[in-house]
Amino acid sequence: MLMFGSQTAGQLERGLGMSRHRVARGLDELLSAGAVDHRAGNGRRTLQWTPMKPSSLMPALRERRHASARAARRSMPLHEVLPGTVPLDDGMRHLPSRELTRARLAELVGAVRHEHLAMQPERAYEAESARSAVPMDRALLTRGVRMRVLGALPADAEDPLVAHGRQEDDLRPEYRQATETPVKLIVMDRRTAFLPVSPDDLDHGYLEITQEAVVAALVALFQRQWEAALARQEHGVPRITLSERERDLLRLLAQGHTDASAARAMRISRRTVSNTLRALMDRLGVENRFRLGLAVGALSLIEPPGTGSAAMEGVR
């Protein structure tokens, strides 16, 4: 009709080669959507059907969609509708509890090969979730999986997982503080994502999502937040307090020691040296040792080599 103008139902039937029933049903749907109007005739098939201009139709359709979405939000919560693990659609299902979600995450950990992304908006971790996260993180990082975490806690805050089994020598994920994270999120290998059904009550479980387009959109959301967190950190280097081990290690490296010779001098393993430096880079929001050196110098975290009396006697 947009191409050929107003027509009767009979003309549409002949022009489209469609049955009377299908044309009538289509016209009823268009009329209910406000996409067509009609003028009276002798009968339904003699009504003159006229299309509405797209410029006036599209705002109305958008408003109808928003109204439907608002009505859906006012409807019964998802966790009350779905009592068990229920497929919602292709590529999406509901895991109705934290326990079932943790079990599913543990099942998938063995298949992750490249990347694990997480957004953690909470400032206090639920104990059981934190305890299960420690071995998962250890398995992924030991296997060489890149882990990136956006959280609400400051980068220089005490690691909350230490209280739940994380060891000093354990590898740590890359971490950046976000002033706010839009939603709790986990994405594995950019293939599977987990979102809470009710952000205000995680006991209602999670959605497991494998729809490619949805997962890609969630990864893009994470990436925008990750880059914004980096921009904030580069704008102002965070103040931190060094532990005695961190201070001793930085002094040795500033004097020209290698990782190996610093490890021997401090009687620790080279792995501990690497982990300590990685943790410092994460806390300061820098990506490599060169930037770490600049940040340490800018914050005057250690005395320059050859100055003062702190010449490392305590570590020999």
Image (spheres, helix red, strand yellow):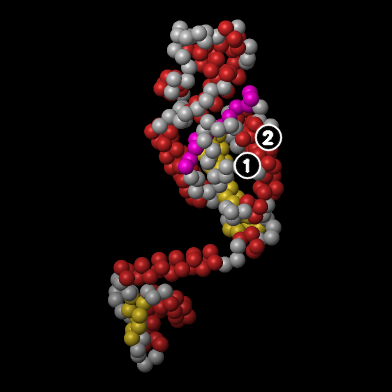
Residue located beneath label 1 in the image:
125
Q: Residues within 10 Å of mark 2 (few under 14, many from 20)?
A: some
Quadrant of image for the N terminus? bottom left
Q: Is residue 129 above or below residue 86?
A: above
Residue 113 visible in the shown view: yes
Quadrant of image for the C terminus? top right
Picture quadrant where residue 28 is located: bottom left
Q: Residue at x 57, y 44 (%)?
A: 122
Q: Secondary structure at mark 2?
A: helix
Residue located beneath label 2 in the image:
164
Where does residue 123 sit, x and y in percent of width and height? 57, 42
Q: Secondary structure at mark 1?
A: loop
Q: Observer-nearest residue: 309 or 47?
A: 309
Query: Which residue type does callout 1 highlight?
Result: Tyr
Q: Observer-nearest residue: 3 or 61?
A: 61
Is 23 left or right of 258, judged from the image as shown? left
Picture quadrant where residue 27 is located: bottom left
Residue range highlighted in magenta: 168-179
Which numbered disc, 2 or 1, marks the residue that appears first in the sequence?
Answer: 1
Q: Are marks 2 and 1 in contact (CB under 8 Å)?
A: yes
Q: Residue at x 53, y 41 (%)?
A: 152
